[in-house]
Image (cartoon, rainbow, N blue to C red):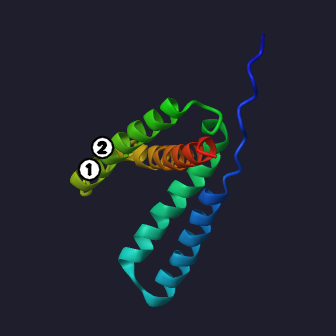
């Protein structure tokens, strides 16, 4: 017996964040604001990857969405700490690379958890 199909969700919030990051990137480039420039790059990377993850994650249970958020945040924090503490070393394959996909996973999990709760409260 097949279960009911899980709801599908378009990644609209993720794409709005991606567009916001692109706009901030342009502003930072024009105004020569390094902090905003770096932040906009991270926002674009996380939002773009979250948009890729969201369609699959939207079909999962709330527990899975929360677990994805927690795991994504933990690995993102690990990657950020590694990046900061090893900034002067030259490594081809660094654990800091985990920062990007797991930042997208955390963002996707967070957005999907919020939309899941909003959809079930109706």
Q: Secondary structure at mark 2?
A: helix
Q: Are marks 2 and 1 in contact (CB under 8 Å)?
A: yes
**Compared to 1, does 69 lie above or below?**
below
Residue at image position (63%, 45%) is 119
Expressed as whole percent of the image width and height from the top left, the position of residue 76 reads: 37, 46
Q: Is residue 57 left or right of residue 25?
A: right
Q: Nearer the viewer, residue 88 or 57?
A: 57
In the displayed image of the protein, which residue is found farthest to the top? Answer: 1
The residue located at (37%, 78%) in the rendering is: 34
Residue that label 1 marks:
81
* Residue 87 vertical position relative to residue 22 in the rendered view, above or below: above
- Nearer to me, 90 or 39: 39
**x and y percent of residue 38 in the render?**
41, 69
Question: Would you name the residue on which mark 2 appears?
Answer: 78
Residue 119 in the image: above or below residue 31: above
Distance between mark 2 and mark 1 Cα atoms: 5 Å
């Amino acid at each position: 017996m097949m279960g009911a199909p899980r709801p599908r969700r378009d990644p609209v919030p993720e794409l709005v964040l991606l567009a916001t990051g692109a706009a901030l990137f342009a502003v930072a480039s024009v105004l020569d604001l390094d902090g905003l420039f770096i932040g906009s790059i991270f926002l674009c990377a996380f939002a773009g990857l979250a948009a890729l993850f969201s369609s699959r994650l939207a079909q999962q249970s709330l527990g899975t969405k929360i677990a994805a958020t927690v795991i994504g945040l933990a690995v993102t924090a690990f990657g950020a700490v590694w990046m900061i503490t090893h900034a002067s070393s030259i490594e081809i394959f660094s654990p800091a690379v985990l920062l990007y996909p797991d930042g997208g996973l955390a963002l996707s999990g967070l957005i999907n958890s919020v939309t899941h709760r909003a959809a079930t409260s109706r």
